[in-house]
């Protein structure tokens, strides 16, 4: 959590809690690619953005999806290191974004819905691609490396 974005709902953190949050981020994800410090607010904002993007229709290829899920994977690594009160305060937000992502995706066939890194074993329900990337009823270009046929529940639409 960022002090600058401290909540106004009476749930202020102690100095020790802030130190513990900073230590968790230093250990797992100290900086963004541009060198700016990573924060809990920043990771949650990126995860919310991923849920937004996948709900609207994911416009990138399968390897990019894996890269874009970095924010959720970092949250999974950092979460157990956060003070219990921070987890309690922010858990409803994380759960809401997780649920939105689940609703906007379908599971890989044969993969468990439960367990570590569940978000990496899901495919967006709606893929938006260039018309030239369409490949009939199969996966579009950029998704054709998937190890299973495209589920009927995955819609592929040309970008407009």
Image (spheres, rainbow, N blue to C red):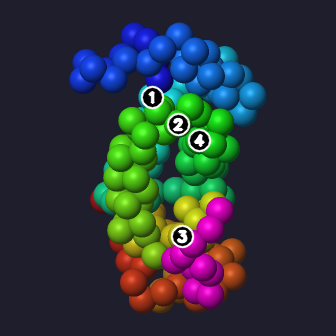
On the question of residue 102 being in view, the answer is yes
Residue 114 sits inside the magenta stretch: yes
Whether tag 1 and tag 2 are in contact, CB under 8 A, the answer is no
Q: Are there few (<14), some (14-19), or many (20+) residues within 10 Å of tag 2? A: few
Asked whether, in this view, residue 159 is left or right of residue 14, the answer is: left
Residue 6, quarter of picture: top left
Q: Which residues are magenta?
A: 107-116
Q: Residues within 10 Å of mark 3 (few under 14, many from 20)?
A: some
Q: Nearer the viewer, mark 2 or mark 4?
A: 2
Label 4: how many residues lie within 10 Å, few (<14), some (14-19) or many (20+)? some
Q: Position of residue 157 (x, y in %)?
A: 36, 71
Give residue 125's quadrant in the image. Answer: bottom left
> Is 102 above or below relative to 32?
below
Q: Which mark is residue 41?
A: 1
Q: Which residue is mark 3?
A: 122
Query: How many angstroms separate mark 3 from mark 4 (CA)?
Result: 21 Å
Q: Earlier in the sequence, mark 4 or mark 1?
A: 1
**Picture coordinates of residue 41, whole percent (x, y):** 45, 28
Spatial CA distance of label 1 from label 3 is 24 Å
What mark, if any, has residue 84 been given in the picture?
A: 2
Q: Report the residue at 47% width, 32% height from top.
A: 86
Is 70 colored magenta in this rendering?
A: no
Circle nearer the viewer, 3 or 2: 2
The Cα–Cα distance between marks 3 and 2, rounded to whole angstroms, is: 29 Å
Determine the secondary structure under disc 4: helix
Q: CA distance from mark 2 to mark 4?
A: 9 Å
Task: Say if 45 sits above or below 3 in the image.
Answer: below
> Can you identify the residue that label 4 sits on?
79
Name the secondary structure under disc 1.
Answer: helix
Q: State which mark lies toward you, 1 or 3.
A: 1
Quarter of the image with the C terminus is: bottom left
Q: Is residue 126 above or below residue 108?
A: above
């Amino acid at each position: 959590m960022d002090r600058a974005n401290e909540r106004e709902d009476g749930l202020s953190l102690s100095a020790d809690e802030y130190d513990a949050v900073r230590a968790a981020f230093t250990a797992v994800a100290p900086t963004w690619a541009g060198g700016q410090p990573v924060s809990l607010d920043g990771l949650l904002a990126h995860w919310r953005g991923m849920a937004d993007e996948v709900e609207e229709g994911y416009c990138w290829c399968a390897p990019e999806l894996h890269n874009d899920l970095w924010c959720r994977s970092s949250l999974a690594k950092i979460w157990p290191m956060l003070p219990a009160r921070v987890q309690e305060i922010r858990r409803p937000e994380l759960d809401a974004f997780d649920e939105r992502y689940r609703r906007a995706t379908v599971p890989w066939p044969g993969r468990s819905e439960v367990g570590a890194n569940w978000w990496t074993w899901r495919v967006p329900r709606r893929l938006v691609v260039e018309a030239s990337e369409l490949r009939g009823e199969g996966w579009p270009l950029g998704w054709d490396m998937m190890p299973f046929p495209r589920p009927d529940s995955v819609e592929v639409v040309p970008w407009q």
